Image: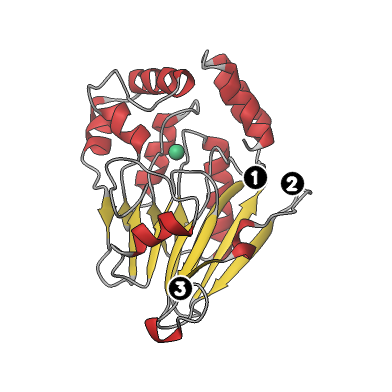
Amino acid sequence: MKYAIVSDIHGNLEAFRAVLEKCGQLGVNQYICLGDTVGYGADPSACLQLLRSLNPLAVVKGNHDEFASNDDEVMEGFNPHARAAVLWTKSQLSADEREYLARLPLRMSPRGTKLTVVHATLDSPDSWGYIFDSHHAADNFAYQYTLLCFCGHSHVPLAFCKKPVLMHSGKPIEEITDWAMHGETDFTRETYAEIFIQNGFKYLVNVGSVGQPRNRDPRASFAVYDDEKMVITRYTIPYDIATAQAKIRAAGLPERLATRLEVGG
Ligand code: ZN
């Protein structure tokens, strides 16, 4: 089975379509979404409809999904751009779409799989903390009972493995540095990075963002987990950034939300 894991689409229909086209070429069987399908981008409703049409195996709630579907207008922790985007997004969604987002769970372990999915962290999924280093990863691993955990939220691809207790020479938790693809400079082509899963280890994988990357690589990022080959692959895909930017400007959303797409930050 090949599972595509997408996160932080953020209303960017051009990026999401490019990712789905690649998934079709790769023969993906099931889709998993780690949340924040809406917020920032100009097509929240179309992205939600497209996601739901895939009949995904699992969808969890992100912080933008939460604030676009509840009545909290203070939005603690949101900067003015994010807040403006949430209020605009809310005005674009139908009652049914808001209801759908409101009902999403914060974490899930789909039956028959060896994976858990969450938007932010397993240790406190509703306080929207970020995983940026092995200390944060350790907190997450303490609540991770499955071989794999996929998360999003930071929009920065990052992966950690936890070694079996008997192998604890050196650090028990290590970053899998290849996953970040540092040093990429040609953003006009596709690239990929792989993690080969070893039994007895545990893995925590941030798949990066489809619709608003923040790792200085503007390409759409997502992952495919092949549970027969025991490989997780992260793909980075160029997409039509100019059209996504033009729609953000036409909608009257903050200019920064358009410019950041071309720098990936
Ligand atoms: Zn997000």
Figure quadrant, ligand 1? top left
Q: Earlier in the sequence, mark 3 or mark 2?
A: 3
Q: Earlier in the sequence, mark 1 or mark 3?
A: 3
In the image, residue 67 above or below residue 155: above
In three-dimensional space, the C-alpha distance between marks 1 and 3, rounded to whole angstroms, equals 32 Å
Q: Quadrant of the N terminus?
A: bottom left
Whether residue 184 is visible, yes or no, is yes
Q: In the rendering, at what x and y percent does residue 135 appear?
A: 43, 57
- Asked which secondary structure carries label 2, the reply is loop
In three-dimensional space, the C-alpha distance between marks 1 and 2, rounded to whole angstroms, equals 7 Å
- Asked which secondary structure carries label 1, the reply is loop
Assess disc 3: are there few (<14), some (14-19) or many (≥20) residues with their C-alpha within 10 Å of its C-alpha: some
| Cβ–Cβ under 8 Å for marks 1 and 3 | no
**Disc 1 residue type?**
Arg
In three-dimensional space, the C-alpha distance between marks 3 and 2, rounded to whole angstroms, equals 34 Å
Reading the image, the residue beneath label 2 is: 187
* Residue ID at (39%, 45%): 51
Q: In the rendering, at what x and y percent does residue 145 appear?
A: 28, 69
List the single residue furthest toward the front.
170
Q: Nearer the viewer, mark 1 or mark 3?
A: 3
**Disc 2 residue type?**
Phe
Whether residue 247 is visible, yes or no, is no
In the image, residue 234 above or below residue 15: below
* Residue ID at (54%, 17%): 254
On screen, residue 101 versus residue 167, left or right, reads: left
Reading the image, the residue beneath label 1 is: 219
Q: Which mark is residue 172?
A: 3
| Cβ–Cβ under 8 Å for marks 1 and 2 | yes
Q: In the rendering, at what x and y percent does residue 144 appear?
A: 31, 65
Q: In the rendering, at what x and y percent does residue 193 appear?
A: 63, 64
